[in-house]
Image (cartoon, rainbow, N blue to C red):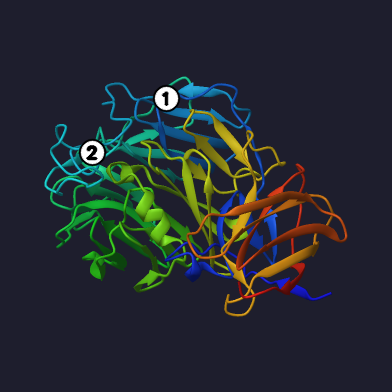
């Protein structure tokens, strides 16, 4: 018996050609690699019995001073409060200007009249796109602060379900986003002129700068449009669609100093940024970036796949969610459709990537609640990483080509020695072909036994592992009993 260990490194590699993905996993859905083994991500269940109205583009969870837990959800139509016992209350401000569920524009595929451009060729980039409406939500002590791009006003909600959110006194009214800094200033990001304004420290009703307070403003020098801000590493990171800036607290008289910290690294959307301990990471238009005092590109083994299949007109919907229990950041994005339907995941502890399919538009990590809370495109709030139910989705991972030697001989496989925590939790399917891009032959799925009898041959093979039980399975290094066949 000649046993070949199928030692496939963690994570997905989906860049380049078929052979460039040799010896790696190149496709997956709802699996992760954690501490050396492959396993399913946790399942989900509905937290709320009814859906919110509109497409949710921001979710906030926080505790009040009495340790009551709260959730706020901002959609393009409404602002909601969800109590810890899942009672949904409409707290939409009076006079709120509703927005757009999807971006509206004249770019990319399907642009122009029939026959305007060659089939399969995007039109020129000379039109404008109005982004989908997004919210920025933050906690000011035990109160909630929010701003929607369609409306521009800053609202505050003071924990009273009998009353809706109200306009924050004296605050600027033409804004794209807000953020609460680590020093307890409220930042308002201007929709016009890239102006950053901030309230007095600990007083979000005082915005007029004077010698007796620390309110102030600063206009960024940038060719881009200011989109969002996040506190990180004792600074506040400011992102436009083309570059990055930092705001550092210096105290009176200037209060904050500003500096450009990166170019060609703008965020793809207002909610595509996640803060992880002492760094921030975000998706840009063609790649990923990380900031830990300086901005640098984040190499991704799945970037080609993600950006090639993204619906570019709807990139304003991209949403990042940190899952700290597994040291991961997930980005949900629209692929060949108008709404978020897929995800790309980066494990920042082990530095590998994964991909998959699930429709989520916003979310929050654990901390306030035991489970991560994510909002579906259907308007329901889901608890994630609980159980192993996935709405009929298939849980799998598939390798790129595996060869014997340099691929000049046929591989003749006779049996498989599985490596599972509990045998029978997964099945294995093998696909063979003689040349890259040639027609594949499929064998299986095989139910795991020790050993598992298989019979196939080919110059290169790929293996697909599929979860067959709704349980917390583990897969390690499978071994294949295979020998080199003829050169024909």
Mark 2, residue position:
170
User: Residue 4 in the image: x percent, y percent?
Assistant: 74, 74
Q: Residue at x 86, y 61 (%)?
A: 451
User: Residue 294 in the image: x percent, y percent?
Assistant: 35, 74
440 with respect to 275 (left or right): right
- Give the image quarter of residue 25: bottom right
- Give the image quarter of residue 354: bottom right
272 with respect to 438 (left or right): left
- Distance, label 1 to label 2, CA atoms, is 21 Å
Tag 1 and tag 2, C-beta contact below 8 Å = no
Is 224 in front, or is 73?
224
- Does 370 appear above or below 182? above
Mark 1, residue position:
91
Is 468 in front, or is 269?
468
Q: Residue at x 59, y 70 (%)?
A: 23
Is 116 in front, or is 90?
116
User: Residue 344 in the image: x percent, y percent?
Assistant: 48, 54
96 with respect to 423 (left or right): left
Is 107 in front, or is 364?
107
Q: Which is in the foreground here, disc 1 or disc 2?
A: 1
1 or 2: tag closer to the N-terminus: 1
Under tag 1, what secondary structure? loop
Residue 64 visible somewhere in the drawing? no
What crowding class fits label 1: few (fewer than 14 Cα within 10 Å), some (14-19), or many (20 or more)?
A: many
User: Residue 157 in the image: x percent, y percent?
Assistant: 41, 32
Q: Residue at x 60, y 22 (%)?
A: 49
- Does 158 appear above or below 421? above
Q: Residue furthest right?
A: 450
């Amino acid at each position: 018996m000649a046993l070949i260990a199928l030692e496939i490194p963690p994570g997905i590699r989906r860049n380049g050609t078929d052979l460039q993905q040799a010896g790696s996993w190149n496709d997956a859905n709802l699996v992760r690699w954690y501490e050396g083994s492959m396993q399913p991500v946790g399942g989900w269940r509905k937290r709320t019995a009814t859906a919110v109205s509109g497409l949710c583009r921001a979710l906030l969870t926080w505790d009040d001073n009495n340790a009551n837990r709260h959730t706020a959800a901002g959609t393009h139509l409404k602002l909601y409060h969800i109590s810890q016992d899942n009672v949904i209350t409409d707290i939409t401000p009076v006079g709120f200007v509703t927005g757009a569920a999807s971006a509206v524009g004249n770019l990319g595929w399907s642009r122009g009249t029939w026959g305007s451009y060659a089939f399969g060729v995007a039109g020129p980039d000379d039109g404008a796109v109005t982004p989908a409406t997004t919210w920025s939500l933050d906690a000011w002590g035990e109160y909630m602060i929010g701003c929607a791009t369609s409306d521009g006003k800053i609202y505050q909600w003071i924990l009273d379900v009998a009353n809706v959110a109200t306009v924050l006194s004296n605050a600027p009214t033409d804004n794209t986003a807000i953020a609460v800094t680590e020093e307890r200033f409220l930042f308002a990001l201007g929709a016009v002129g890239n102006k950053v304004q901030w309230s007095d420290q600990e007083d979000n009703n005082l915005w007029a700068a004077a010698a007796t307070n620390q309110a102030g403003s600063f206009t960024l020098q940038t060719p881009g449009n200011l989109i969002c801000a996040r506190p990180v590493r004792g600074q506040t990171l400011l992102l436009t669609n083309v570059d990055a800036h930092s705001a550092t607290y210096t105290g009176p008289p200037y209060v904050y100093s500003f500096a450009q910290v990166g170019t060609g690294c703008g965020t793809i959307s207002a909610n595509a940024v996640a803060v992880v301990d002492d760094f921030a990471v975000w998706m840009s238009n063609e790649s990923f970036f990380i900031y830990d005092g300086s901005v640098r590109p984040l190499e991704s083994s799945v970037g080609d796949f993600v950006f090639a299949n993204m619906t570019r007109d709807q990139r304003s919907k991209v949403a990042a969610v940190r899952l700290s229990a597994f040291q991961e950041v997930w980005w949900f994005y629209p692929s060949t459709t108008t709404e978020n339907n897929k995800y790309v995941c980066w494990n920042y502890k082990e530095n590998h990537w994964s991909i998959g399919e699930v429709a989520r538009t916003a979310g929050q990590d654990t901390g306030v609640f035991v489970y991560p809370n994510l909002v579906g495109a259907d308007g329901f709030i889901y608890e994630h990483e609980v159980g192993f139910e996935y709405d009929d989705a298939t849980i799998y991972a598939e390798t790129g080509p595996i060869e014997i030697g340099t691929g000049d001989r046929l591989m003749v496989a006779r049996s498989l020695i599985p490596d599972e925590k509990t045998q029978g939790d997964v099945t294995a399917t093998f696909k063979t072909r003689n040349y890259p891009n040639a027609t594949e032959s499929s064998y299986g799925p095989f139910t795991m036994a020790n050993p598992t009898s298989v019979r196939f041959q080919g110059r290169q093979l790929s293996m697909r592992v599929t979860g067959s039980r709704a349980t917390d399975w583990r897969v390690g290094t499978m071994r294949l009993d295979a020998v080199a066949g003829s050169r024909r």
